[in-house]
Amino acid sequence: MILERTKNEIVVRLPAGVDLTELQNMIDYLDYKEQTMTSKISQKEVDELAKNTKKSIWAKFKAQRGMK
């Protein structure tokens, strides 16, 4: 692995044999960290948003399958 810092970014070079699923999970986490660096939202607000999102997804899933 090679880690390089440039003026505007950090470059990570990995061997081609790295598991892509694990790499994608890591990239998703880093993307999340980047997007939330300046966020002022509280954990309570995040939890409420997640709860509402889950309810919405489940309702759509049940509606698509004719479930009650």
Image: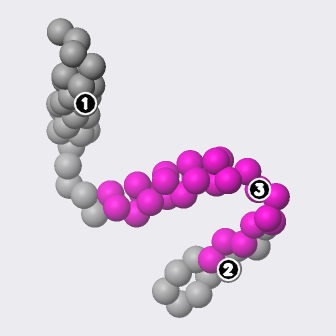
Which one is in front, 54 or 59?
59
Judge whether residue 26 is colored magenta: yes
Tell me if 13 is positioned left or right of 65 in this view.
right
Q: How many marks?
A: 3
Residue 4 is labelled as: 2
Which one is in front, 40 or 22?
22
Write down the residue under mark 3. 18
Tell me if 62 is positioned left or right of 6 in this view.
left
Report the magenta residues as a range.
11-36
Q: Amino acid at mark 3?
A: Val
Q: Check the image and report above or below for 12 versus 23.
A: below
Circles 2 and 3: CB atoms closer than 8 Å: no
Q: Residue at x 21, y 16 (%)?
A: 66
Q: Check the image and report above or below for 50 versus 8.
A: above
Say whether disc 2 or disc 3 marks the residue closer to the N-terminus. 2
Instruction: Mark 3 vs mark 1: give the one in front.
Output: 1
| Helix, strand or loop status at disc 2 | strand
Say whether disc 3 or disc 1 marks the residue closer to the N-terminus. 3
Label 2, residues with CA under 10 Å away: few <14, some 14-19, many ≥20: few
Note whether residue 47 is visible.
no
Q: Check the image and report above or below for 51 versus 62.
A: below
Circles 2 and 1: CB atoms closer than 8 Å: no
Residue 57 is labelled as: 1
What whole-number distance in Å separates the C-alpha atoms at marks 2 and 3?
18 Å
Q: Amino acid at mark 1?
A: Ile
Q: Check the image and report above or below for 22 versus 37.
A: above
What whole-number distance in Å separates the C-alpha atoms at marks 3 and 1?
33 Å
Q: Amino acid at mark 2?
A: Glu
| Helix, strand or loop status at disc 3 | loop
Q: Position of residue 2 (x, y in %)?
A: 76, 73
For the stretch drawn in magenta, the main secondary structure is helix
